Image: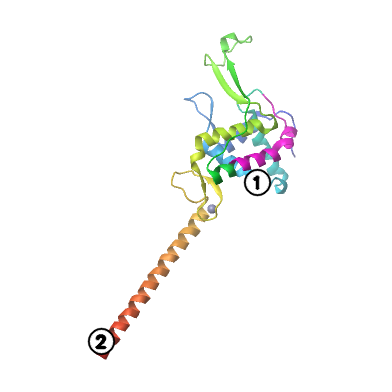
Amino acid sequence: MTNISNILDSEVRARALVRIGYFDDTKKRGRQVDYRRLLGWFVDFSRKDLAKMSPAEQFSLREEIRALQEEGLNFTVNDASVITHWIQTQEAVAHYLKTLTETGQFYSEPFQLKFSFTIPQFLPEGAAQLKERIYFGEFVEPFDGKGLLYLLTLALRHAGDRLRYCKHCSTLFVQARRKQRFCKRECQQVASMRALRMIEREARKTKRRSSQANRRASHGKKRR
Ligand SMILES: [Zn+2]
């Protein structure tokens, strides 16, 4: 059964954020994101067939979108609002990634950036649980998917150098390791099998050629 409540349950949101690459860092302040994984999430999102996804898959993707849009803000994004923009947002994400990887450059649309400040000592209701003396945030209002596109630009800024096209299947992916050349293990295996066969074929050819040459050489000797 799907839950169409307007407020994303905090546990559901936390789980969605973990799927995307967010984690709590106790040394730094609050929640951190692995931009490499966030960028990977956008790359996956850009090629999902929204119409063919099962209702459960659709719902969990919308949970992720809502969680991303709400992250760090005091906004609640309802499921219905995601449905109104996710197709256009997906197109925009795909367009950004395509332009960037095909031309090497891209300019985002303009964003209206807002800054938030919290100084707990001035909060009317007190701030027993807030440890820092000042909190600062910058964000783009999440509505209409703009907040999501802004997050994509942040992910590109921090991890865009890891975008690659797979050497085997040409799928766009984000490198987990610097030297990674294939999008997944299967592609790597097929490619190394091919390389191995090529080496074997070359070796056989060289062998055949040298034995033919030897035969010719010995024939020559006999005739002499
Ligand atoms: Zn591949």
**Where in the figure is residue 56, as x and y percent of width and height?**
70, 43
The answer to whether one can see residue 108 in this image is yes
Q: The residue under label 2 is which amino acid type?
A: Lys
Above or below, 75 against 214 in this view is above
Judged from the image, the secondary structure of the residue bearing numbered disc 1 is: loop
Magenta residue check for 93:
yes
Residue 158 marker: none
Report the residue at 40% width, 69% height from top.
202
Q: The residue under label 1 is which amino acid type?
A: Lys
Residue 221 marker: 2
- Viewer-nearest residue: 1 or 114: 114
**Where in the figure is residue 187, as x and y percent of width and height?**
52, 55
Report the residue at 55% width, 18% height from top.
135
**Where in the figure is residue 69, as x and y percent of width and height?**
64, 30
On the rendered image, what quadrant is the N terminus found in?
Answer: top right
Magenta residue check for 26:
no
Residue 48 marker: 1
- Viewer-nearest residue: 149 or 107: 107
The answer to whether one can see residue 11 in this image is no
Q: Quadrant of residue 198?
A: bottom left
Look at the image and give the residue range highlighted in magenta.
Answer: 75-96
